[in-house]
Amino acid sequence: MAGCSSNKCSGKLQMTEENINKRLLSEQIGNKWRDLARQLKFTEAVIDTIESDKGTSTNECCIAVIVRWTNQKGEDATIGKFAEALKKIGLRNVAEKLPCLLSSEENDEMESTIYEIEKNCKQLRKEHHQLQVRKQELEKEKQSMTKQLQDSLEESQKLRTRIQELEEELSRVKQQLHETSQESEEWKTRTLKLEKELAEIREDKSELDLAENFDNSAREDDFEDTRNSLAPGRGDTEGEIDAKLKDLDELLRKM
């Protein structure tokens, strides 16, 4: 299998009983199983127990040592550590080939796992790029909304100022309206007074005209001299009344 000697990841994989049985490690280790057991930190008492249980079969003793070691170490029972132990007992050739002892199924599984990891990484990079783009869009949107908010605040301030100005103007108009209303009442009272006075003057003038007509018809011949002597005074009175009526009419027209 090409590239096995450079497979650095294999040394970190865990030893399993399936690897041992499928690749016949026990046959390649043979009579050196005791040396291997000592390198894997087993005591002589444990080694004797294994030999007592398995009898003279070196393969069975070797398998028992490896299985007990993997059970004790768990995840720490890696192919790399096992290979180091093999090198120390003079089985370098077996140790160097050990990373390639994985079954084809395990290689396929590893390749599938690597493919999935690479696929996930690619997807994550894509999502990261999308997030970066979305981040930039949100930054632009934030700037736009901030500007809109500032513009709204400025417009709101202008509206508040305008409202205040209108309220002040409305207050002035109300005050002027109140003053105008009072003045209107004064003018109304004055107008009524003038109208009353004008009516009285017109009534007086009508009475004077009636008296004059009666005087002219009854005494035209008998009192001509007397009337002539009184005419200037009466003329002055009528002129004054007409002038006053004219002034009152003009004042009412203006009002």
Image: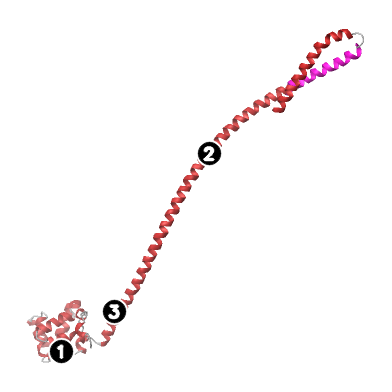
Q: Spot the residue most to the right.
A: 221
At a point 86% along the width and 7% down the height, the residue shown is 226
What residue would you read off at disc 2?
167
Q: Main secondary structure of the magenta part?
A: helix
Where on the picture, by quarter, is residue 54? bottom left
Q: Is residue 4 above or below residue 155?
A: below
Magenta part of the protein: which range?
Answer: 195-219
Q: Which residue is mark 3?
A: 114
How dense is the environment of label 1, judged by Cα within 10 Å: few (below 14), some, or many (20 and up)? many
> Which structural element holds mark 2?
helix
- Which secondary structure lies at badge 1? helix
Judge the density around disc 3: few (<14), some (14-19), many (≥20) Cα neighbours within 10 Å: few
Report the residue that reaches farthest toward the left.
44
Residue 178 is at least partly visible in this image: yes
Distance from the alpha carbon under mark 1 to that under mark 3? 31 Å
Amino acid type, callout 3: Ile
Q: Earlier in the sequence, mark 2 or mark 3?
A: 3
Q: Secondary structure at mark 3?
A: helix
Q: Is residue 46 visible?
A: no
Looking at the image, which is closer to me, 246 or 6?
246
Q: Earlier in the sequence, mark 1 or mark 3?
A: 1
Percent position (x, y) of residue 102?
Answer: 22, 86
Measured as percent of width and height from the top left, residue 198 is found at 75, 21
User: Label 1 belongs to which residue?
Assistant: 26
From the top left corner, tell me how far across and down residue 246 is, in percent.
75, 22
Q: Quadrant of residue 180?
A: top right
Give the Cα separation between the discs numbered 2 and 3. 77 Å
Cα distance between the residues tagged 2 and 1:
104 Å
Q: Earlier in the sequence, mark 2 or mark 1?
A: 1
Location of residue 206 (image quadrant): top right
